Amino acid sequence: MTNSELLQQVRVIDPVSGNDRIADVLIADGAIAAVEETISDLSSDTLVRDCRGIILGPGLVDLYSHSGEPGFEERETLESLMQAAQAGGFTRVAILPDTKPPLDNPAGLARLQKLAADITDKLSISPPLSRSPALPLYFWGAMTLGVQGQQMTELAELANSEVVGFSDGQPLQNLALLRRLLEYLKPLQKPIAIWPQYLELAGNGVMREGFDSIRLGLPGIPAISETSALAALLEVVEAIGTPVHIMRVSTGRSVQLIWEAKVRGLPVTASTTWMHLLLDTEAVSSYNPSLHLDPPLGSPADRTALRRAVQQGILDAIAIDHRPYSYEEKTVAFAEAPPGAIGLELALPLLWQTLVATGEWSALELWRVLSTQPALCLKQTPAAIAPGQPAELILFDPQLTWTVEKQTLKSRSSNTPWLGQQVTGRVVQ
């Protein structure tokens, strides 16, 4: 079988070099052999593909998502999650530790890492483009036992177990514990991801507090539940000096606080989720349970501020925060539905359609915050499109239309507000 492939006249989008151009790309033995305007000197067994109209980009990187396995396999298994990630163009995904049991000890972590490695081998496919390392799943180690926010885990032991970093994926309420955690984690030099939110202030709210929550008769979550927790977190970071990644930023005021912190030189990075860039509280009028998110969708002004902040680099990356739930769990009233939605298969086409196809963002801007920047936030080397680099690549057809249905999704769950809708753009390999 041929082990080299020529992608002819493909649109190459490479945020590392800043290139967005039409070129021929030769891939051999799972690595990039050449990127040139035209390539004609080929071995006789090279597979030649006409890629006009197709985009070649580095694989996407997801900072944080949820696995159903172990504990909730009816929502998602590691295998279905990896298939969904591959279908969506993600070549690296970092999983949060809130599984059941949680990833708060080396033994549980080792079992999941072994399972992920076995599935990776099983899913490895043979065309040259895909012979790059198959999808690596990375795992965040829990900061507190049972991700309960009460007692520290054995942080050094987890660090030695090759966790990608530390996060509970849940809001920490105890500032004294947060301070101790940042002190203990500082010498381990692993990424730390924290979600700022005060649960007491959030109360029993299910959407962002404001005009729309009153109009829709749904209990509101005030923006200060996020911003007050963020302000306190930034004070602790300034005092201790440990670098922190701020997860799930959802308000315009949070953007302002992060910008001020960066101007002061605080060692922080930050991300918002893809759905917070596309939708706002006005969408909740459908009462679709898949729009019940945590943090909730912001106001139209928040959405505008988040988009601008990602473009300007105040927010470093877009996360997917893929959170699968079974049909039975989500087919209830909006306020009773567990918060979260799937996203690995939908984020790239919908972001492209909304932001790039309309001219609001450049293709490079979108790819940078879905690929290069998330990798840097995880302290990893970003994939690049250059000779000698591994072919950690995806082919994306921005014109291909498909309908989002249970049958067309690789995920076991279909909790998304786009279910039943036609979407333009799909990863083809």
Image (cartoon, grey):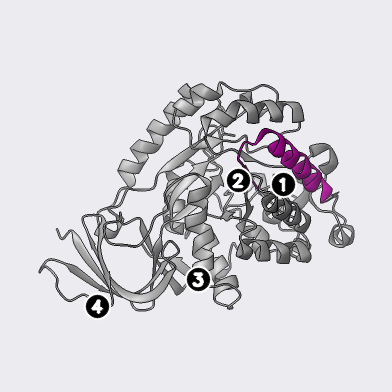
Residue matched to label 2: 325
Residue visible at 38% across and 59% down in the picture: 384
The spot of residue 55 in percent (x, y) is 40, 71
For the question of whether residue 250 can be seen, the reply is yes
Q: Quadrant of the N terminus?
A: bottom left
The spot of residue 235 in percent (x, y) is 75, 39
Q: Is residue 35 left or right of residue 403?
A: left
Q: Residues within 10 Å of mark 4 (few under 14, many from 20)?
A: few
> Which of the two marks, 1 or 4, is nearer to us in this view?
4
Q: Amino acid at mark 1?
A: Ala
Marker disc for residue 337: 1
Q: Amino acid at mark 3?
A: Ala
The magenta segment is 223-247
Looking at marks 3 and 2 on the same chain, the residue that comes earlier in the sequence is marked by 2
Residue visible at 47% across and 60% down in the picture: 408
Marker disc for residue 153: none
Marker disc for residue 363: 3
Q: Amino acid at mark 4?
A: Thr
Residue visible at 56% across and 55% down in the picture: 343
Element at badge 1?
A: loop
